[in-house]
Image (cartoon, rainbow, N blue to C red):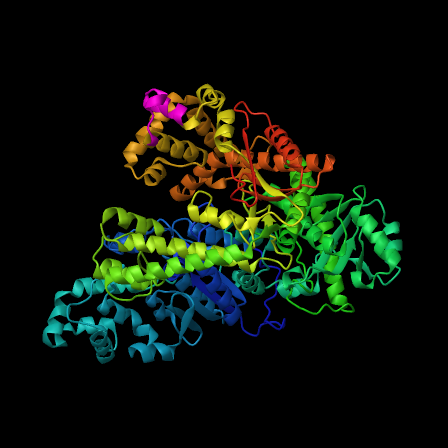
Amino acid sequence: MAEKASKTTATQPSGEPAEHPRLLLLDGHSLAYRAFFALPAENFSTSTGQTTNAIYGFASMLANTLRDEQPTHLAVAFDVSRKTWRSEEFPEYKATRSKTPDEFKGQVELIGEMLDAMSVRRFAVEGFEADDVIATLATRAEADGFQVSIVTGDRDSFQLVSDQVTVLYPTKGVSELTRFTPEKVQEKYGLSPQQYPDFAALRGDPSDNLPGIPGVGEKTAAKWINQFGSFDALVERADEVKGKAGQNFRDHLESVKLNRRLTEMVRDVELSCGPADLLRAPYDRQALTVVLDALEFRHQNFRERLLAADPGAVEEAVAPAAGVAVDGVALGAGELAPWLAEHDGVPLGVATVDAWALGSGSVSEIALATPAGPAAWFDPAELDAADERAFAAWIADPERPKVMHDAKGAMRVFAEHGWTIAGVRMDTALAAYLVKPGRRSFALDALSVEYLGRELAPAAADSGQLAFGADDQAEQDALMTQARAVVDLSEAFEGRLTEVGAAELLHDIELPTSELLARLERAGIAADRGWLESMEQQFAAAVQLAVREAHAAVGHEFNLGSPKQLQEVLFGELGLPKTKKTKTGYTTDADALAWLAGQTEHELPVIMLRHREQARLRSTVEGLIKTIAPDGRIHTTFNQTVAATGRLSSTDPNLQNIPVRTDEGRAIRRGFVVGEGYESLMTADYSQIELRVMAHLSEDEGLIQAFTSGEDLHTTVASQVFGVAKTEVDPEMRRKIKAMSYGLAYGLSAFGLSQQLTIAPDEARKLMDTFFERFGGVRDYLQRVVEEARATGYTQTMLGRRRYLPDLNSDNRQRREMAERMALNAPIQGTAADIVKIAMLRVDRALREARLTSRMLLQVHDEIVLEIAAGERERVEELVRREMSGAVELSAPLDVSVGAGSDWESAAH
């Protein structure tokens, strides 16, 4: 990385020049590996399949150490490979170490990218270990008057300890560090740091495959070194060592001498720079934000701890980036209307502090900003009648442009004041999503850092304050600065959207969908509380029954929710076949239990699966009951920026979580009912939309013909794949073809298909090969999608929605294969998502143009749910079928199914 430290002056936390420079050195590989085993890999991974536990643990440890040690200089050393001068002298050196876990691979490289963004110098020297680099830098720094701290998990580093050099040794993962000073080394081993390599040579080191002396442990080794003064003196007087231990020492003298040479750290490695060149420099916060977003580290506390260690943070806090000063004014009663008139015709950025998250649907503060700089702040509660009319007219005027961040959220809250928002020309959250759909944070402050290179101070609600101080100048300025950031981001995204071909997607689909979703969220759907409560009681009883059955099956009570106790029962007491080994034991997840149920005749795995399913259903229903609002309706929140494919999701509650094909799921859906003033609910969805999209994109004539024949698709395809008449296709054949057809649309591998169908991988592969022989167009399309994405770096839907997949060219097989599956999946799933959004917009527009009272309520998966007014059912059904089937033109025409009833389940079709 480029050096950035030459122009910076070392400072203490107070900002005063440091009296003594303090160098912090870290053993990158050692600490990353410890972090990998300290944090469960299954809990840390990105949507592309990259495991991130070592990166997270390393970064957390680094942030804490920077906070505690306050170094002025910093460097991290890494190993290059296992081939070093030590392995050349002793080929068995570290030979017994196990193979690096696949989940660890690639993480060191990503740690390097993070360190580069933090302006941290990193070293890796061919032929030497990180320890040698650290020893060289520490020795030079000590001679130059530095105080040195070394963070490493290698005890050989204790030989470097002195009055100026301290080793911080991890004693619990990487969260607890023990400080080794000369006194601590003496206390721990009874030796001076200078004597430690002598001691280590006698003791041996199993982790490095350095053999010890039979019968000689740490106490004996320390006694000998103290008795003879040094290793060399001990060797010279070897004949004086008495007893069997002495004879063993003489018998193994040559290997002990080799140990001593290998244990000594090299202190004169040739490096490109010295300690003085390692002065800490400000982070490249824009680059760091990009790295953290790519790693999908969303925890705000984690980010804050990492950013708090930025040596440039104090300077930036008092000297904001040039060009972001806001010429703002706090408007009182009677001043808003004239201000709006003065700035009429220009796009105004809008930022709000609202109390929605605090349980109130009111707007507390609003800020407006112009592209030229002037901004205004006001409290809606302080508006006079003229101001209120002027603002209501401006915010609802589609010809007066606004730019916002998360316009949907503002629409929902503003509606509580009776304000309608129209004329949104840009939503910076949606724009950021279209430009880079794989990122996980679309927060305004994160986008400001990445695209504008500036940080934003939080406004009141963002900082968790419950009281909004109308006369707090800093708070007002913060909100006006946010409004200005929205304007500037809008300008930045205009060009980027054009570059990625997403400008039409934003204006024609995403922005109108955002406005529609805001209305759906406000409308909600009526809920039958009594029915849901009875379902909750039913599932609770089923959970308790499963608990009793599990205890009876084992012969004693145990905690079904404790993985440790379940492991002891399954693999200890019952002796069932071992599942996949993890750090905490053998896995007992749902896949493992299903496997055990198939491998054994014991009833416990089956009972455990039923217990977990009933507990999950109970939790789902409990969540639904808690979200019933005072109006008797459930108001979910729709998310446009979560799924990288463009699909919508929902939260609070998650309505996509309700099973569709099980009896229990259908029973839960009966709790969603028609509301007062309406006659029925109507559901409408697309039949086999993903497969129709796949047929269209692949242009496979056989698959298109199977759709247009009017016969059952899976039966028709099965007859061709298995080479039998359609009348001879049995249910098992149809099931296999259905699973495989949908699997191809989701990027399913032969192994995944074998797991899903409970067949051998070879049989699954043969089934897929036979399918591709019959439908070569599908095979060629899927191959072409991956090849084109590997060349361009992204996939694209019919409407131009891109998904970027840089891991298609990764050296890491796991990441590359995950990206390949996403490349197969994204165009099909993304196109289906685009079609559903178009259909929603067409249906909504047609309902309003026909001046019907019926309205749309929900969109879940590929299904639209509407509330039908009395006497409008036939007109609405005709309208829905027309608008949905005409959303796009496919060679395998869209087919729409419609049903109606008094509740969501009875409205199914």
Q: Where is 892 relative to 843, above or below?
A: above
* Residue at 43% across, 67% down: 175
Residue 36: tell me if it is visible. no
Residue 232: tell me if it is visible. yes
Decide whether residue 867 is among the magenta residues: no
In this image, 789 relative to 464: left or right? Answer: left
Q: How many marks?
A: 0
Q: Observer-nearest residue: 671 or 703?
A: 671
- Extent of the magenta region: 715-731
Main SS of the magenta part reads helix
In this image, 197 relative to 529: left or right? Answer: left
Decide whether residue 728 is among the magenta residues: yes
In this image, 525 relative to 459: left or right? Answer: left
Q: Where is 157 relative to 822, above or below?
A: below
In this image, 666 relative to 586: left or right? Answer: right
Q: Position of residue 288 (x, y in %)?
A: 56, 54
Q: Observer-nearest residue: 306 or 839?
A: 839
Q: Where is 204 relative to 758, above or below?
A: below
* Residue at 42% across, 43% down: 815
Q: Position of residue 268 (x, y in %)?
A: 39, 61
Q: Position of residue 413 (x, y in %)?
A: 70, 55
Q: Observer-nearest residue: 706 or 68?
A: 706
Q: Position of residue 714 (x, y in %)?
A: 41, 28
Q: Observer-nearest residue: 35 or 866?
A: 866
Could you say which quadrant of the image residue 377 lies in?
bottom right
Could you say which quadrant of the image residue 261 lies in?
bottom left
